[in-house]
Amino acid sequence: MSDRPAITWYFDTVSPFSWIALPAVEALAARHPVTLCPVVLGAVLAHWGTVGPAELPPKRLHTYRLSQFLAGRAGVPMRFPPRHPFRSLEVQRLLTALGATPATVRSAFEFIWRDGRDASDPQEFAALCGRLGVADYEAVVAARNAREGLRAATEAAVAAGVFGVPTLRIGAELFWGVDALPMAEAYLADPTLFSGGEMARLATLPIGVERRR
């Protein structure tokens, strides 16, 4: 039996950074088994009492510029959909119903972030369903308990400590964001990465002051 830790990638199609991270996750999946796990970002943020970067007015444009810049630097074609944030719940349920296979996940991301289409618009969502070979969204979601499945996956992600997307989980360790992917690769190459020196001290670093809420 393999002693390699299980690897899970948590994502929400509303996240431009999830799209930017996708090629690296696909490359990782070519070397190690990776489970692609749709979650509801809004529910994750609500659990931890935080908001998404696009929900903070001064941070919104910066986030968009940064994601567009990072996509260009990584050679990932990206065109923002007509509005953002948008409701991604139906897309997440659809991917859950389809088993979040690599092909369906990539196709959904390409529809939104490569082609710049609005999956929250009913007609556009119907086009996405057609692209994924789904003739009756409601029937597929109901037949495969996708509502309950997505809710359970989101709750399990929160229980594992996931606080945002994209997050790569390797065993019990979490790697959040595009910029954490090199650290994830380093951890896979050396599972003792966090167990010595300053890395080990960080795990027990005391809190000096807490902001009142």
Image: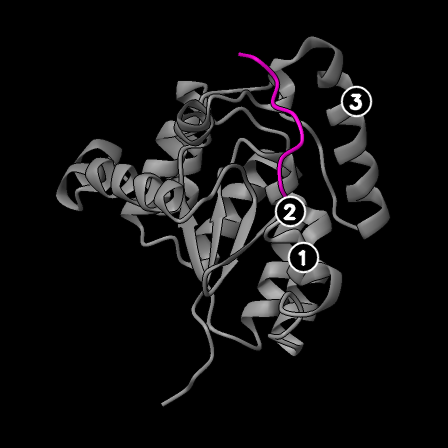
Q: Residue 200: say if magenta.
A: no
Q: What residue type is labelled 3?
A: His
Circle 2: element type? loop
Residue in view at x 54 percent, y 40 percent = 165
Mark 1 residue crowding within 10 angstroms, few (<14) / some (14–19) / many (20+): few
Disc 3 on helix, strand or loop?
helix
Q: Earlier in the sequence, mark 3 or mark 1?
A: 3
Q: What residue type is labelled 1?
A: Arg
Find disc 3 in the rendering and name its residue: 62
Spot the residue most to the bottom.
1
Q: Say which residue label 2 marks.
A: 205
Vertical relation: 211 (above or below) 65:
above
Q: Going by the image, does 151 lie left or right of 121?
A: left
Q: What stretch is highlighted in magenta?
A: 206-213
Residue 32 falls left or right of residue 189: left
Earlier sequence position, callout 2 versus callout 3: 3
- Residue 199, image quadrant: bottom right
Q: Point out residue 94 in the picture as x, y percentages from the top left corner.
A: 33, 40
Report the Cα–Cα distance between label 2 and label 1: 6 Å
What is the secondary structure assignment of the residue under circle 1? helix
In the foreground, 195 or 86: 195
Tell me if I can see residue 83 in this picture.
no
Viewer-nearest residue: 65 or 45: 45
Residue 105: assigned label: none
